[in-house]
Image (cartoon, rainbow, N blue to C red):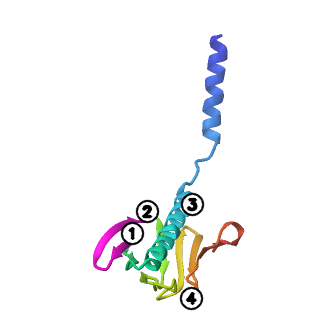
């Protein structure tokens, strides 16, 4: 019986050494992309209802972040996890009361060589993101 327990312990130890560690950064970047997309759609719905809210994107050397604000009041601050960068030419994401964006463009969330894109279309203000095989890896 002791030989069986020792043998099982050795098998578990060998399996633990063989299985590689999983990089969870890709899952975190995907989660942040989905969360930001949801926030943008929320801001669009709020602006359709006449509430003047927007998302402001900031990048420092160490971290990317975005702020949700109503006029001058800061409502929420979201910082990206370490090694995940947010790149965009849109500094302020804001919509008219008819749903059109003030500025259209793309927000990219980068982790290593994987790029997750969120696109805000110019005329309709639709918020789209590329998923699966359509997302790009550079």
Q: Secondary structure at mark 4?
A: loop
Q: Earlier in the sequence, mark 4 or mark 3?
A: 3
In the visual, does 123 lie left or right of 60? right
97 up-or-down from 5: above or below: below
Q: Which residue is mark 4?
A: 122
* Alpha carbons under labels 1 and 4: distance apart: 28 Å
* Alpha carbons under labels 1 and 3: distance apart: 17 Å
Q: Are marks 2 and 4 in contact (CB under 8 Å)?
A: no
Front-lying residue, 111 or 56: 56
12 up-or-down from 7: above or below: below
The quarter of the rendered structure image containing the N terminus is top right
* Alpha carbons under labels 2 and 1: distance apart: 7 Å
Q: Earlier in the sequence, mark 2 or mark 1?
A: 1
Q: Position of residue 67 (x, y in %)?
A: 37, 72
Q: Are marks 2 and 1 in contact (CB under 8 Å)?
A: yes
Front-lying residue, 84 or 5: 84
Q: Which residue is mark 2?
A: 82
Q: Are marks 1 and 4 in contact (CB under 8 Å)?
A: no
Q: Which residue is mark 3?
A: 26
Extreme residue toward the top, this view = 1
* Alpha carbons under labels 3 and 2: distance apart: 12 Å
Mark 2 or 4: in front is: 4
**Picture residue at 44% right of the left edge, 62% below the top:** 81
Q: Which residues are magenta?
A: 64-80
**Picture residue at 53% right of the left edge, 60% below the top:** 31
**Picture residue at 34% right of the left edge, 74% below the top:** 69
Q: Earlier in the sequence, mark 3 or mark 2?
A: 3
Q: Dot 4, crowdedness within 10 Å: few (<14), some or many (≥20)? A: some
Q: Magenta segment, principal secondary structure?
A: strand
Q: Position of residue 122 (x, y in %)?
A: 56, 88
Q: Which residue is mark 1?
A: 63
């Amino acid at each position: 019986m002791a030989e069986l327990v020792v043998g099982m312990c050795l098998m578990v130890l060998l399996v633990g050494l063989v299985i590689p560690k999983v990089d969870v950064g890709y899952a975190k970047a995907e989660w942040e992309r989905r969360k930001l997309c949801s926030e943008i759609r929320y801001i669009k719905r709020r602006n359709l209802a006449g509430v003047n809210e927007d998302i402001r994107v900031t990048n420092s050397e160490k971290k990317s972040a975005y702020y949700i604000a109503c006029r001058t009041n800061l409502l929420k601050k979201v910082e990206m996890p370490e090694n995940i960068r947010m790149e965009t030419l849109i500094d302020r994401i804001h919509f008219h009361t008819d749903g059109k964006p003030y500025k259209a463009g793309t927000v990219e969330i980068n982790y290593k060589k994987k790029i997750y894109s969120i696109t805000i279309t110019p005329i309709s203000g639709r918020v789209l993101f590329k998923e699966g095989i359509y997302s790009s890896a550079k």
